[in-house]
Image (tube, rainbow, N blue to C red):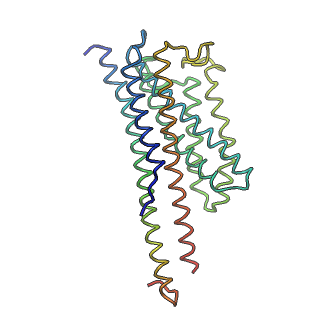
Amino acid sequence: MAKRDTLGMVLTGLALLAVGAATFFALGYAPTERVMGDVQRIFYFHVGIAWVGGLALFVAFVSSILYLGRGESRTYDIIALSSVEIGVVFGIMVIASGMLWARPVWNTWWTWDPRLTTTAITLFIYLAYLMLRGAIDDPQRRARFAAVYAIIGFASVPVTFFATRWWNTIHPDLFSQGDFPPLASPMKVAMFVSLFAFTLVYLVLLRARARVEQAADEVSLLKQNVLSS
Amino acid sequence: MSPEMSDIASFLIPAYIIFWLLTFLYVFSIRSRQRNLERDLDALKKVVEKKQGDPTGKPM
């Protein structure tokens, strides 16, 4: 029988409440933007999703360094794998929500803008991470290769982040002015509530995904024991 | 329908639906993988118990 995960249930409850609050702040509390109108409200979830995407890949980067630096502990490999998977899911979401915002505002679903292009490249780099992991049978070799790949692949994340400053782009840059973020106060509140809510969602998903990998290890170990006995 | 209302129906609502839908699908996939593993684990534990009960060590 499955063990009762009290902390997981509390975190899930908090995350659901926070996402509900973020939806209210984005759709009901934040004022309508003057130029773009109500469609600008996509921004609050788009930024939250992008934040989780970046955070997940950063956690995978740090875990991969720790995996190689601290005796190749499986725990760090599990965190890195789980985090990359979440990063990829949120990467797909950020591109989808960005396209739905771009269509009415830029009059196109997609343009080869530096920010959009680097985001797509980052997504493909981490999709390849997941595919390559699946192609290596030896668990230790797979984890070592994945750690090196995640460390090198992470270079695409700061490039994506700074793309709006390094190149000419039509994508808005929240950090371009002294006042961060350059928004009216109620909009700032909606944005930070969204960032908080999505961080909780990330923690819930990370915990749940890591538990799957731990269960898979347990099954694999038991299978070996059965076969060898 | 005004252009503003049309934008809400065509882009704002779908953007929020995509988030909920993909999150739900991902949670469902995690839950389904966990359930399958728990089933495998239970089956393997039963095999181990049977083997321990059988002095020849052969699976039944």
Quarter of the image containing the C terminus of chain A? bottom right
Residue at the location (56% across, 62% down)? A217
In the image, residue B57 above or below residue B37: below
Of residues B31 and A155, which is closer to you in this image?
B31
Displayed quadrant of residue A107: top left
**Residue A84: percent from left, percent from top:** 57, 44
Relative to A42, A138 lies left or right: right
In the image, residue A209 above or below residue A180: below
**Residue B50: percent from left, percent from top:** 46, 81
Relative to B34, A165 lies left or right: right
Residue farthest toward the top in the current orientation of the protein: A34
Of residues A178 and B4, which is closer to you in this image?
A178
In the image, residue A131 above or below residue A166: below
Residue at the location (51% across, 25% down)? A192
**Residue A143: percent from left, percent from top:** 65, 55
**Residue A113: percent from left, percent from top:** 56, 23
In the image, residue A109 above or below residue B44: above
Residue at the location (67% across, 58% down)? A141
Relative to A111, B4 lies left or right: left
Residue farthest toward the left in the current orientation of the protein: B1
Relative to A225, A148 lies left or right: right
Displayed quadrant of residue B24: top left
Instruction: Tell me how many marks there are.
Output: 0
Displayed quadrant of residue A1: bottom left
